[in-house]
Amino acid sequence: MSFPFFIAKRYLFSSKTKTAVNIISFVSMIGVIIGTAALVLLLSVFNGFENLLLSMYNSFDPHLKITSNLGKTFNSESIISDLGNNEEILYFTEVLEEKVLMKNGEHEFIATIKGVGEDFIKMTNLDSIIVEGENFTNYKHSNVAILGQGVAYHLSMGVGNMFSQLKIFVPNRGSKTLLNPSSAFSYSSVLPIGIFSLGAEYDSKYIITPIVFLQDLLQKKGVSAIEVQLKNENKMLEVQKYLQSNLGENYKVSNRLQQHAVLHKILNSEKLGVFIILTFMLIIATFNIIGSLSMLMIEKKKDIKTFWNLGATQKSIQQIFFIEGMLTIIIGSFLGILLGLLLATLQMKFGIIGMGEGNFIIHSYPVSIDYFDLFLVEITVLIIGLFASWYPANILSKRLIN
């Protein structure tokens, strides 16, 4: 054991003397522990919300989505034949979307109707987001629909009532007199069989029907997109590149990240903002070490003089107090990470802190531990601690020795 490390350890863990300086050093370590634990815990909670949002959206969105760059709809026959021969693809379904006017009694609302193929239920975890009613499995006819919770609210619409059907209006493209309401719009009725809840972005926007119903209503056989689910999600980028090269510039193949590019940017920027704010709080807590080290060096003036007379160099004396400060940082950050992990684990298993009263999808704050975040927190604390320990150890020790 080196001389500087031995003396630094004695100063930090000495039980014979309990002075105000020792108490301040202990308080500084407590500050590092709390700051590190808060950083770990809040980043884990943020990861939990991020994973929750992405898992909810992923239950509705495909791995890959093929759209046309030339128009709103396209003929999918040639593409479907290629997709059927691709061994990496598990399911795929045709999708047709259109803005429609819906009417239930005196209530009217404009939303997007999404016509889907038979494999849509297999591709998506639709049952997990249906809060009332059921999906299309038990219905052979196509005049049925699943409404977003927000859409159902605006229309005051329930489910399962055969005598309360929803009217859907679309512009009649073949009509020559748009001013005549009887000929300007085509309409049909659907039976609402389910209500889903995914998030405000979807709940107040979408109504889902079989694609056959929507194609008959619009009198068109084209599709607006083909949604693809892969056998192995890890090969998403590889399959995307392959499909894009085969389909050419007339089509666009988007992966899940690109389908929600704005959402991912917002989540990443918010996480970065939270990390920066908490890092500044941690800097304030860590800078207490500068004060405690400075007071310790003033208190140990006689020891410094003794070490100097015994032949210790200025560098070794500086190392004593630098190591003492870094020991405080290392121990404090290690205990802080353990405390943060303990609190995060308890929240994951027991949901100690709830979301409060309200119509939430989950009852307690979600938590997800990312070990890269732990590494990042530890590196951040150590970098802050290096400066907080170096400054008094080098600057003040020179003055005391002189």
Image (tube, rainbow, N blue to C red):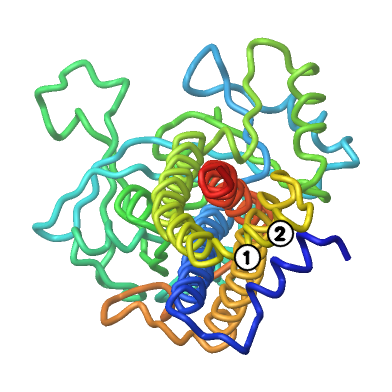
Let me know if residue 61 appears in the view.
no
Kindly identify which residue carries mark 2: 307
Residue at figure coordinates x 58%, y 26% from the top left: 67
**Vertical placement of residue 301 versus 400, above or below:** below
User: Amino acid under label 2?
Assistant: Phe
- Name the one closer to the observer, 399 or 150: 399
Q: Which mark is residue 276?
A: none
Which SS class for mark 2? helix
Q: Is residue 214 left or right of residue 240?
A: left
Q: Is residue 149 above or below residue 95?
A: below
Provide the secondary structure element on which disc 1 rests. Answer: helix
Q: Is 110 displayed left or right of 224 in the figure?
A: left
Q: Position of residue 46 (x, y in %)?
A: 48, 59
Q: Measured along the vertical axis of the image, is residue 43 above or below residue 358?
A: above
Image position, residue 8 (x, y; %): 69, 66
Q: Give the residue furthest to the front.
A: 309
Please say if the residues under marks 2 and 1 sit with CB atoms less than 8 Å apart: yes
**Image quadrant assignment for residue 359:** bottom left
Circle 1 packing at 10 Å, graded few (<14), some (14-19), many (20+), is few
* Residue that appears at 39% across and 55% down: 284
Q: Nearer the viewer, residue 378 or 138?
A: 378
Residue position for label 1:
303
Kindly identify the amino acid type of the residue bearing the numbered disc 1. Asp
Q: Quadrant of the N terminus?
A: bottom right
243 or 184, which lies in front?
Answer: 243
Q: CA distance from mark 2 to mark 1?
A: 6 Å
Residue drawn at (53%, 71%), measured in percent from left and top?
29
Q: Where residue 366 appears, x then y in whole percent? A: 50, 71
Q: Is residue 360 left or right of residue 282?
A: left
Q: Residues within 10 Å of mark 2 (few under 14, many from 20)?
A: some
| Residue 194 visible in the snapshot | yes
* Image quadrant in which the C terminus is located: top right
